[in-house]
């Protein structure tokens, strides 16, 4: 049907031991469909039709073929189904063996990430084509990560700023993937590791919270909830499109929205309290008091984002007395806020935040703050600062105010 130069290999041959369902994971029901069916829909939603290889459990190949081929054909997409192997790596290798000659770019995707949006597939494919390198979608790691020995003793804290959690689809120039697989000695947990093991450069592009992997039952529950919300949003949009009911529904429901957030923290009486602001630690500066780390900039951004999306505010979401957030850094709140927005169908357009206070002097570290916050939020964040000419509590140096504005757009 098409001579696509982009192929997507959907690996779906795993048994799903940790999910603990009688069916192999990809065939477990989800949203009135199966996990694989939902994943396939995202692939079929790509801007340009790809060639699709589904790698199915060996004893379910015929059944998967019967379900998937007509569905792909309806979208004018060529799709083949092959039997998987004992490991994910072997399953990918079997998929690679099915690629037609004209394919130049290959995306490898876990069926277990059914809600990865079509847009991520498009972006990864375009980045591989543009850069000629391996491309993996990744998200910043928001939890503190520690190296722990076999006895459960903490050895060290790993520098989180250098870490990213990898997702799929992972994309590669065909010859890179083929030769890396041909020469792979060891087992790798993902294709990027295998390709990097063969000495090929791999770049990370922003991932998407919705591309999470269904591993345990609670993940399946979360996916089910998101699909229910997505179906409700789609039916509301369809109703809006009906001329007869156009007046009954707000015409602005699918347009971008802005929100404002303000946060104030007093400087701590304890001169030993470290200052955390805009996600950064400020050595030598007096800290801010608060249940968390007092990062007024991060908190104001969270409130602006939540307000824009109509999701309430940071106090309602995290609970100011919740012991889990005692001493937590701003990026924990920001990461979770962005995830909640994504779950509710919003992505961040941009954020602008202004700090009002005498100290710390923002200017020398403005670029660093903007870079860090931009990475966490996944959209441009600009940071400005001002003093108040000696007036008010900020002018007297008693505390810091941060005021943020956020733009969110339907995703
Ligand atoms: N996969 C595969 N062939 C295998 C093992 C895994 O195609 N032999 C696929 C899975 O179907 C899944 C993806 O690789 O889409 C990621 O693997 P994982 O989430 O670990 O799935 P399972 O191996 O099925 O789950 P578990 O490890 O809990 O058994
Ligand atoms: Mg597995």
Image (tube, rainbow, N blue to C red):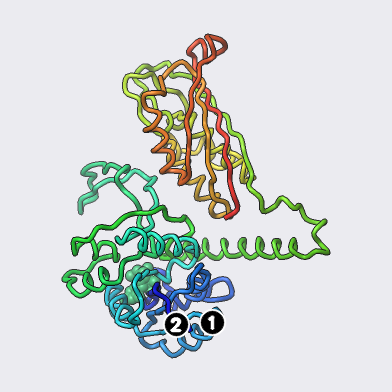
Estimate the x, y position of residue 361 in percent, counting from the top left: 40, 19
Q: Which residue is located at x 62 percent, y 38 percent?
A: 259
Residue 49: where, in percent of width, then height?
A: 48, 74
Q: Is residue 276 visible?
A: yes
Which residue is at a point 37% across and 69% down the rendered structure image? 107
Q: Can you tell me which quadrant of the image ligand 1 is in? A: bottom left
Decide if ligand 1 comes within 8 Å of the CB at mark 1: no
Residue sitting at x 45%, y 32%:
292
Can residue 16 be seen in the rendering of this structure?
no
SS class of the residue under badge 2? Answer: strand
Q: Which residue is mark 2?
A: 79
Asked if the residues shown at circle 1 and circle 2 are in contact, with their CB atoms under 8 angstroms apart, the answer is yes
Q: Quadrant of residue 74?
A: bottom right
| Viewer-proximal residue among 138 and 30 | 138
Q: Secondary structure at mark 1?
A: helix
Give the residue drawn at x 37%, y 78%: 13
- Compared with 158, 219 (above or below) is below
Quick one: label 2, few (<14), some, or many (20+) residues within 10 Å? many
Pointer 1 or 2: first along the chain: 1
Residue 250, above or below 181: above
Query: Looking at the rendering, in which quadrant would you find the C terminus?
Result: bottom right
What is the spatial separation of the Cα atoms under label 1 and label 2, in whole angstroms? 9 Å
The residue labelled by disc 1 is 71
């Amino acid at each position: 049907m098409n001579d696509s130069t982009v192929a997507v290999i959907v690996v779906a041959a795993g048994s799903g031991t940790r999910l603990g369902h009688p069916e192999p994971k990809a065939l477990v029901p989800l949203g009135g469909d199966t996990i694989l069916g939902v994943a396939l829909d995202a692939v079929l939603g790509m801007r340009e039709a790809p060639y699709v290889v589904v790698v199915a459990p060996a004893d379910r190949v015929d059944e998967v073929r019967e379900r998937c081929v007509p569905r792909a054909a309806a979208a004018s997409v060529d799709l083949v189904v092959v039997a998987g192997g004992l490991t994910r790596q072997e399953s990918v290798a079997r998929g690679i063996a099915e690629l037609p000659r004209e394919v130049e770019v290959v995306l490898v995707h876990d069926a277990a990430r059914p809600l990865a949006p079509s847009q991520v597939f498009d972006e990864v494919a375009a980045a591989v084509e543009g850069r000629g390198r391996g491309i993996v979608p990744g998200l910043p790691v928001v939890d503190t990560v520690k190296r722990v020995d076999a006895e459960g003793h903490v050895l060290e804290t790993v520098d989180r700023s250098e870490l990213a959690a990898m997702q799929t689809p992972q994309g590669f120039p065909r010859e890179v993937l083929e030769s890396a697989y041909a020469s792979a000695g060891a087992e790798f947990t993902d294709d990027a590791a295998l390709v990097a093991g063969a000495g090929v450069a791999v770049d990370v592009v922003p991932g998407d919270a919705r591309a999470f992997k269904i591993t345990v039952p609670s993940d399946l529950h979360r996916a089910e909830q998101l699909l229910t919300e997505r179906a409700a949003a789609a039916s509301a949009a369809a109703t809006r499109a009906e001329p007869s009911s156009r007046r009954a529904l707000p015409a602005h429901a699918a347009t971008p929205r802005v929100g404002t957030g303000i946060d104030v923290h007093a400087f701590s009486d304890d001169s030993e309290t470290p200052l955390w602001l805009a996600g950064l630690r400020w050595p030598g500066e007096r800290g801010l008091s608060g249940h968390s780390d007092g990062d007024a900039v991060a908190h104001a951004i969270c409130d602006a984002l939540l307000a824009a999306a109509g999701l309430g505010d940071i106090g309602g979401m995290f609970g100011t007395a919740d012991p889990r957030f005692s001493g937590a850094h701003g990026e924990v709140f920001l990461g979770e806020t962005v995830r909640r927005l994504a779950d509710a169908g919003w992505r961040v357009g941009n954020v602008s935040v202004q700090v009002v206070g005498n100290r710390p002097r923002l200017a020398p570290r403005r670029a660093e703050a903007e870079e860090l916050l931009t990475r966490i939020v996944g959209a441009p964040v600009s940071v400005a600062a001002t003093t108040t000419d000696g007036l008010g509590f900020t002018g007297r140096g008693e505390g810091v105010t941060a005021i943020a504005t956020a733009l969110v757009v339907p995703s």
